[in-house]
Amino acid sequence: MPDLRGIDVSSHQGTIDWDAVAASGISFAITKTTEDDGYFNPTFARNWREIKRVNLARGAYHFARPEVNDAIQEADYFLSMIDANGGLSPGDLLALDLEAGSGNLAQWALDFLHRVLEKAGVRAMVYTGAWFSGPHGLATKPEIATYPLWLAAYAPTKPAAPPPWTSISIWQHSDQGTVPGIAGAVDL
């Protein structure tokens, strides 16, 4: 099976021409929804609607701030903002973006992931990099590996999955991509 090409977008990309993105061969797009329990991405509603309209697989992610709130509070906010903007459709992807915070964050991550699964019925992915997951103890909770890994690793070849994962579901290999319909750099 060929590798699928996807992008990760946020308000940094501004207004996106989703028809041009879809025509370029991109297969999926994941858009930032929320951060902590008070930031809502101003481009989310349009991106969420347009990704679906152009028939790309779509996903939504939450940028975690474990030092600010508990995991349940952040998961509830994330899901409420998706619900307020059209909700989930079958096949939609959800992700926890875990690249900020201090100390061992394994239980915090599991609490967030469990809450999303309980409320939305979707097993969210974990977006992180080995540079973050190792120092923040994610391997101390092997159950985290039951949630797919979206690995950020800007390298010319796909690396091995960091513990506790044994495989990578999505490999984000660049933050300097160019895609028709998007002005400036985009994560690939």
Image (cartoon, rainbow, N blue to C red):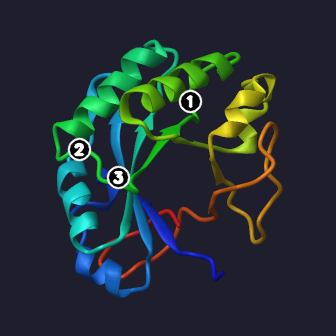
Point out which mark residue 72 bears.
none
User: Is residue 79 left or right of 128 when viewed as pictured?
Assistant: left
Q: Quick one: 188 or 22, which is closer to the camera?
A: 22
- Residue 120 x/y as whole percent: 37, 35
Mark 1 / mark 2, whichever is N-terminal? 2
Relative to residue 151, is residue 63 depicted above or below?
A: above
* Residue 96 position in % (x across, y down): 50, 37
| Image quarter hosting the N terminus | bottom right
Residue designated by label 3: 10
Look at the numbered disc 2 and give the secondary structure of its residue. Answer: loop
Q: Amino acid at mark 3?
A: Ser
Work out how far the residue at label 1 is from the one at label 2, CA to CA, in angstroms: 27 Å
Residue located 58% across and 35% down the image: 99
Q: Bin the neighbour count of mark 3 within 10 Å (Cα to Cα): few under 14, some 14-19, many 20 and up.
A: many
Q: Amino acid at mark 1?
A: Ala
Total numbered badges shown on the rendered structure? 3
Is label 1 in a helix, a strand or a loop? Answer: loop
Q: Is residue 132 visible?
A: no
Q: Is residue 85 left or right of residue 146?
A: left
Q: Which mark is residue 100?
A: 1
The amino acid type of the residue labelled 2 equals Gly
Tell me the distance, in whole angstroms, between the alpha carbons under discs 1 and 3: 17 Å
Q: Which residue is mark 2?
A: 87
Residue plotted at (21% across, 65% down): 50
Question: Which of the marked residues, 1 or 3, is nearer the chain's N terminus?
Answer: 3
* Left or right of 106, for residue 56: left
Query: Residue 63, image x and y in percent?
Result: 44, 36
Label 2 CA crowd tier, 10 Å (few <14, some 14–19, many 20+):
few
Q: Position of residue 105 (x, y in %)?
A: 65, 20
Q: Is residue 7 visible?
A: yes
